[in-house]
Image (cartoon, rainbow, N blue to C red):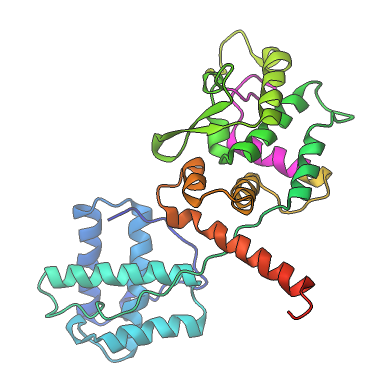
Amino acid sequence: MGSRLSVRHSEPAPNEADLPAALSKLLERFMVYLRVECGLRPASVDAYRWDAMLLLADLARAGVKEFPEATPRHLADHLAALKTRRLMSGTSVIRHLATIRVLCRWALAQGLVPHDPSTVLDRPHRWKKLPEVLSPAQMRALLAEAGRPPAKGPPGLWLRDRALMELLYACGLRASEAASLGVDDVARGVPVLRVTGKGGKQRLVPIGEPARAAVQEYLAECRPLLVKPDGGDAGRLLLSRSGRPLERVAIWQIVARLAARAGLKGVHPHTLRHSFATHLLVGGADLRVVQELLGHADIATTQVYTHVDSSRLKSVHAKHHPRA
């Protein structure tokens, strides 16, 4: 069982004192199981408690005094009520259903119920928000702005910012991946970047000539001025003005600042990653190749970009086709 993040809810959980004695006892036994046998963190246990309390309170309102009395219909009505009362988003309902399944499987394993009433519940489909992408023209404008020395600010830092922006787009990097790049990850004389992604997995990503040239100019003219004698840079490629490794938050700020100067709103590092993937697919790249370049473990994660392309095609068709 994975750990659970605590979440904020639109209303407080029902009072445990209002539950029938049998349901209250069941809840406490379930919490002991999560804390002791599963070893979950307090925040995760609290999230499970809130979900379980919400379910048990609805069961009590439906006249259920002991958990074995709960039927699949009770559980389905509870989920429907959450939607009606708008207590949870679609994603939270999926998480809440996972809590119900864990509770029911635990109760069955403990011999507290004769059967698992959650097995017949359908898993709601997660609503997939299509990622925001920039058009090629917008991307060119953003990179052009990054390549323009500002009128104010520390001299030379714009070379770092330009190298960062080129890498984010040319290699489809996450902000955390860009922050963790080392000087040695830039191959000498070879247009390839070594990227360390989630779980410490490494991948090699080709670098286009504009990005490679921007990185080389930064290494030659800017980075040596940022390095401090104490060696606090840890061999990282991108450094702050204090000589320390550039942090993920600073990368978000740099991207947002340059986007604002280019007249673009709502742009963040992942926007450049989304644009990288979408532009590749529009240009005819194979989906499996894009998966490898992004470092996705599951191709289903990469497939969302095919929907982005499809949405764009439909929009163009509706706008320009005479019989749309």
Residue found at x 40% / y 52%: 298
Residue at the limit of the structure toward the top, as seen here:
229
Quarter of the figure that contains the C terminus: bottom right
Q: Which residues are magenta?
A: 237-258
Locate residue 194, reporting x and y percent.
50, 28
Against 83, is 203 above or below?
above
Q: Name, please, the residue furthest toward the left.
A: 111
User: In x, y percent, where is residue 193?
Assistant: 54, 28
| Observer-nearest of 247 and 169 | 169
The quarter of the displayed image where residue 172 is located:
top right
Q: Classify 10 as above or below 171.
A: below
Q: Is residue 245 left or right of residue 262?
A: left
Q: Is residue 244 above or below residue 84?
A: above
| 169 w.r.t. 299: above or below | above
For residue 226, side relative to residue 14 (left or right): right
Q: Residue at x 76, y 74 (%)?
A: 321
Expressed as whole percent of the image width and height from the top left, the position of residue 271 reads 65, 49
- In the picture, which quadrant includes the N terminus? bottom left
Which residue is found at the position 79% from the left and 71% from the top? 320
**Does residue 226 appear in the picture of this structure?**
yes
Magenta includes 256?
A: yes
Q: Is residue 224 left or right of residue 284?
A: right
Place of residue 36 in the rendered image (x, y in percent of width and height, measured from the top left): 20, 53
